[in-house]
Image (cartoon, rainbow, N blue to C red):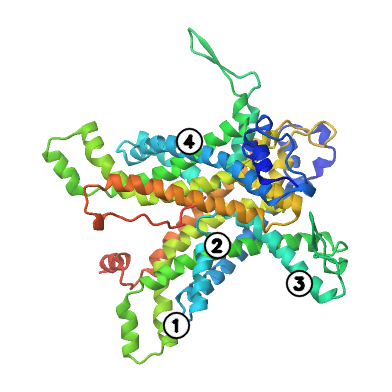
Amino acid sequence: MFAFCADPSVLTGWQWFACYLTSGTHLAFYWSFGTVLLLLALAAPAALAFGFAGALAARSRFLPARAAGGTYIAMVRGVPDIVFFLFVPIAVDQGIEYLIHHARCPDWTEPIRRGAEFAVCPEAKVPQPSASRLAQDTYAFVLALAAFALVFGAFAANTLRGAMAAVPRAQLETAEAYGMSRGQAFRRVLLPQMWVYALPGLSNLWQILVKSTPLLFLLGIQDIVYWARELGGSKTSIYAYPHPDWRMFYFLAVLAFYLGLTWVSERVFAALMRRLSHGQATAAGEALRRAAA
Amino acid sequence: MRTCAESFELYALRALGREWGAVRLPQPTEISLCDQLVLIGSGMIWNVYFGALAVVAGFFLATLVALGKSSASPLLRAPAAAFVFVFRGSPLFIQFFFAYEAFVLLPRAGVTIDLGLVTITAETRWLTRAWAGALVVLFLNTSAYTAEIFHGALKAVPRADLEAADAYGLAGFARFRRIVWPTMLRLAWPSYTNEAIFLFHATTLVFFSGFPAWQQSGDALYYADYFADATFNPFVPYPIAAAYFVVLTLAITFAFGLVNRRLNRHLPAALRPRLRFRPQLMR
């Protein structure tokens, strides 16, 4: 990184730290913070979409859809979320391989599940062993994303269902009185008003989502936790930058990162809540009206 | 293949250690459904152990922290608020890692504390073992979450109750013990039930977060993960673990429901607040 880093063994003091903290592996460590932010940026809308679909299904007038939505919401209650994080990626992976196997190798006669093996034909392996390192990492990341979307989608569905039910009944009756159809009333009246009721639950959910991102480590992805363990472990003098066991300090840095992230989120949601409460028939909206008058 | 009775004999207490059952876990070629049921159930011993002790001990610390956070003195308020912020604002998973690495750094021989007249040597080795180290983290973590719930409840104690207490001449600790505390518990109980459930769920993180499973004795999810790896079949062990947790959740809800009934015994049955499980608190 810096010109004076050419020979680490002669460095001392701040120069040693400047070179140490900008070594190649440390840059990978800093990138892994980006992985966490990327996961958050993708998982939040995906979970919201799953949640919206779940909430709509649970409110549906069509019984099988209502049952499916209700089951989806109830599924995540009572079971630790980490069970899903371990279960979903491997289940989805096997499901995909199973489907491809049936599509590509119809002549394969041996059973797929044999004792302690899950054997599909070589063409059905995902990702193919010849695939690049990047492709394999991306596949693992997408599977992790699916797990996050599924688990947090169920929580979001519960929150959104509650928010839809919290919009005052009179608002919908007024919409009916204006001759709006069920769909129109939903889009024009219910949807714009439900967010203020959903926001406290959704902000809580966001904080939970932020705090579950280290679980990526369990899914074999080289994330913050992986690098903190890797870099912090004691390095003997055969390494360019020998040091004793510093894992505690690395985890302290990770801890500080998460504290900062949750603190900033809290601020943003407070500001958002104030904006959304404008002109709403809630106590917060009433308080804003009084303050303005 | 083993019979179910043999599985039970070999693995029912295996989670406690090697001396309590078979030395080796079931090997990939010989795993039966009973093995999975028994061994994963055996792992639940650890989930119940961590959860129960942390909830009971955390209750007391949480009450103190909540009082500190509601205190008028900034000397008490600031540390209490900081404690709650740190433990609620960061992932439990990272807290486990951090605590484990910190405990490992403690000197092997123990910490010598010089009190002037006597010196005490505190043994620190056991803190790197899950049964003690993870329990400390879970205890502090649930204390912070519970303190926030109790703090909210303290703020929600009706003013009229406090005025009535004043009118009766109750003050200080007597007022706290007889008026404020029971009302706080009554208000906080539904949320506190949720917190307890999530704490029990959070115990599944212990053996995935630095703390080694000594002699392959781990919790329910540790064994479920072991079976999923050994058989390449996630569709049996994870649902088994999930089912055990559903039963545990129902048991917790029932136990907390009993306390809830006792707390609200002065109210007519129809007015008693119902406990509803709302999964909105998590780590």
The mark closer to the camera, 4 or 2, is: 4
Mark 3, residue position: A99
Q: Secondary structure at mark 2?
A: helix
Discs 4 and 1 lie in a common subunit = no
Q: Are marks 3 and 1 in contact (CB under 8 Å)?
A: no
Name the one closer to the observer, A242 or A88.
A88
The first of marks 3 and 2 along the sequence is 3
Mark 4, residue position: B53
> Does residue B177 appear in this view?
yes
Q: Chain of mark 1?
A: A
Mark 4: few/some/many CA within 10 Å (<14, 14-19, 20+)? some
Question: Disc 2 marks which amino acid?
Answer: Phe
Mark 1: few/some/many CA within 10 Å (<14, 14-19, 20+)? few
Q: Chain of mark 4?
A: B
Question: Disc 1 marks which amino acid?
Answer: Arg
Say which mark, if any, is on residue B199: none
- Cα separation, mark 3 vs mark 4, equals 46 Å
- Cα separation, mark 1 vs mark 2, equals 24 Å
Name the one closer to the observer, B150 or A273.
B150
The mark closer to the camera, 3 or 2, is: 3
Looking at the picture, how far across and down is residue A232, in whole percent?
Answer: 71, 38
The mark closer to the camera, 1 or 2, is: 2
The mark closer to the camera, 4 or 1, is: 4
Say which mark, if any, is on residue A187: 1
Residue at horizontal 75 percent and vertical 40 percent from the top? A20
Name the one closer to the observer, A221 or A102.
A102
- Cα separation, mark 4 vs mark 2, equals 29 Å
The first of marks 3 and 1 along the sequence is 3
Task: Give the total of numbered labels.
Answer: 4
- Cα separation, mark 3 vs mark 1, equals 37 Å
Q: Chain of mark 3?
A: A
Mark 2, residue position: A152
